[in-house]
Amino acid sequence: QGYEGLVEGGDNIKQANWLSVSNIIQLGGTVIGSARCKAFTTRAGRLRAARNLVEHGITNLCVIGGDGSLTGADIFRSEWAGLLDELLREGQISEEVAKKNCRLNIVGLVGSIDNDFCGTDMTIGTDSALHRIMEVIDAITTTAQSHQRTFVLEVMGRHCGYLALVSGLASGADWLFIPESPPEDGWEDLMCERLGE
């Protein structure tokens, strides 16, 4: 459950093996779970997360996420030495354990369907999101044609129009709205004229 799992510990932290990842490649979404974690935004929450990691001898993290996840990882990394010092002072870990776990290594991978991170061709999640969108478009296109109706499809992307743009191109959409290029005044008339054609 992401940082929530680090903070809560217990059964949320377990060793993965081949059976853990068997038969999941075709699944969409995050099969290992994901959660917004208010506790991790506080030092107390990060202290609990550090305690749980040290307890399991984990000093390498692979963080897949967007702005919040990667910012949290950077803060956690920068505080690591201080968190271990605090755990040592409070008697929650020994000096030997603190020395053994003195360094936290983090690999950050951009996991965002928005595909809005510079320096990468495609972020993790974008391709599967596009596949899901095209499945939906394929399913409703025949219905729209048989009923002679116009369908409006809203896709995710927060402040980024990448998914809308690419799925609009792939499906041959007649009209498209993206946040990077807001419609100009009078767009309603132009759209109706185009659709009428």
Image (tube, helix red, strand yellow):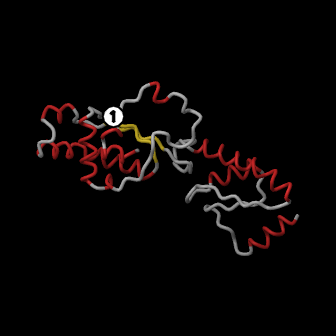
Q: How many marks?
A: 1
Q: Residue at x 86, y 55 (%)?
A: 146
* Front residue of this view, candidates 114 and 35: 35
Is residue 60 placed above or below 8 in the rendered structure? above
Q: Nearer the viewer, residue 58 or 142?
A: 142
Q: Circle 1 is placed at which residue position?
A: 60
- Residue furthest right as drawn: 197
Q: Amino acid at mark 1?
A: Asn
> Is residue 94 shown left or right of residue 74?
left
In the rendered image of this protein, does residue 148 appear above or below residue 98? below
| Residue drawn at 72 percent across, 61 percent down | 152
Q: Position of residue 103 (x, y in %)?
A: 25, 36
- Foreground of the two, 68 or 136: 136
The residue shown at (40%, 45%) is: 2
Which quarter of the rendered picture does the C terminus lie within? bottom right
Q: Residue at x 23, y 42 (%)?
A: 51
